[in-house]
Image (cartoon, rainbow, N blue to C red):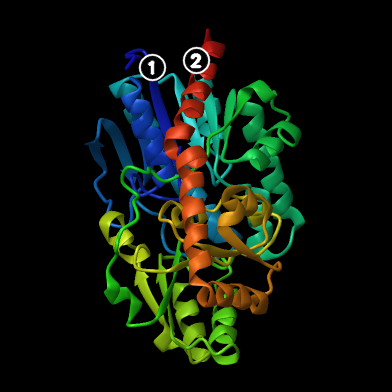
Amino acid sequence: MTSHPDRHILIIVENLPVPLDRRVWLEATTLQKAGYEVSVICPMGRGWVKPYEVIEGVHIYRHSEPPEAHSGAVAYAREYLHAMWFWFRLARTVWKRKPFQVIQGCNPPDLIFVPALWYRLWGVSYMFDHHDVCPELFEAKFNRQGLLYKIMLIWEQMTFACAHVSMATNGSFRDIAIERGRMDPEDVFVVRSAPKIDTFKPGPGDPAYRKGAKTALGYVGVIGQQEGMDLLVKAAEHLIKELGHEDVHFVIVGFGPTRDEVIQDVADHGLSDYFTFTGALYEVDLLAALNAVDIGVSPDPKNPMNNISTMNKVMEYMTLEKPLVQFDLTEGRVSAGDASLYAKANDPVDFAHKIAELIENPEAGVEMGKRGRKRVLEDLSWSHTTPQLLAAYERIFAKRK
């Protein structure tokens, strides 16, 4: 390992605490092991409430979550202003401990360029870690464009303009950085999100999650309005009531702003006995649930955001050797290839039929699962991503010289 005692990186993330944010945590620990000093600013939440601690050599500074508010422009403004105040306050704390040379901003929101611009006065470079396409995310959430959409585009353009180097989660995001963000292709690196294969392993799981069903289906991820949970409920209804596959159970792992609404939707469709909502699960508990299922489902609907996004859940199902069903999305096919069945865009009936195909032909599902894990091991695991992450940082420090 090469030590870089003169290289201190500050990572800022707004929407999840660290180490819960898996991508950020993998980046931080990989950089730390590569000899960089790493500090992280993030919100508290989900049990991670210490304002400061050091885990695996990474210095973590957490701030309070924003006051609760209803969804909408005012709520987002309060959330982002709350976070920005802490970004500046905690960045000063980090700087006093040891000056940093690079700020890595992990969106959303596309506003971390603001503290990055301030610290540019002290020679600090900006690395943009492109997690979400925020204009398309806004469109997916609110089903419209308008003034706020245009503001999102402006923030995105300013983010790319301020970035010395950008990390994209896939090829589609790289194209956006180059075409819409007008970045030099040499300054854009594809750093894919992927599980660590040494800890995320197939296994027997906990059979209690199956509730005695012949076939268990699993979902893991955020439970929000753009994740397609309404489509999954409709697909489940068709699968059970129309196609006659009653010996099934859906294990829903995760948290999110519409979880209660989804639970009510399941009840309204008379499907409560077929669904278990576990809440958030981590590490061994997550593996116990996901390894207990036979088929993974990814009901994210086709829209401008999802079509070009890499879904973590897809990678997790493949890593655990599970066949999966998803809608036909561009980056979904890039990730899963022939380890998945693809339903017609946003068609819950076809989604149900694809699930039924796997239920009725379990041997084919087993083979799909094996192909998916093989694909991860050979091309898509974090070990394949690490060289790109380190190359991006070599690039940004080379540009500093």
> Are the residues at dot 1 and dot 2 in contact (C-beta closer than 8 Å)?
yes
- The label shown at residue 259 is none
Asked if residue 47 shows in the view, the reply is: yes
Which residue is outermost to the top?
A: 401
User: Would residue 221 be found to the left or right of residue 209 on screen?
Assistant: right
Q: Position of residue 367 (x, y in %)?
A: 50, 59
Q: Which residue in the structure is indicated by mark 1? A: 7
Q: How crowded is mark 1: few (under 14 residues within 10 Å), some or many (20 or more)?
A: some
Q: Where is residue 92 in the image (x, y as percent from the top left)?
A: 37, 28
The alpha-carbon separation of the residues under discs 1 and 2 comes to 9 Å
Dot 1 or dot 2: first in sequence order is 1
Q: Position of residue 221 (x, y in %)?
A: 46, 61
**Where, quadrant-wise, is the N terminus in this rendering?**
top left
Q: Residue at x 54, y 17 (%)?
A: 395
Q: Mark 2 falls on what kind of element?
A: helix
User: Would residue 231 be found to the left or right of residue 154 on screen?
Assistant: left
Q: Residue at x 68, y 34 (%)?
A: 177
Hey, which quadrant is residue 61 in on the image?
Answer: top left
Hey, which quadrant is residue 344 in on the image?
Answer: bottom right
Q: Residue at x 75, y 34 (%)?
A: 179
| On screen, residue 291 above or below 267 | above
| On screen, residue 313 above or below 169 | below
Q: Mark 1 falls on what kind of element?
A: loop
- The label shown at residue 397 is 2
Asked if residue 121 shows in the view, the reply is: no
Say what amino acid the circle numbered 1 marks: Arg
| On screen, residue 208 above or below 338 | below
Of 51 and 311, nearer the camera is: 311
Say what amino acid the circle numbered 2 marks: Phe
Q: Residues within 10 Å of mark 2 (few under 14, many from 20)?
A: some
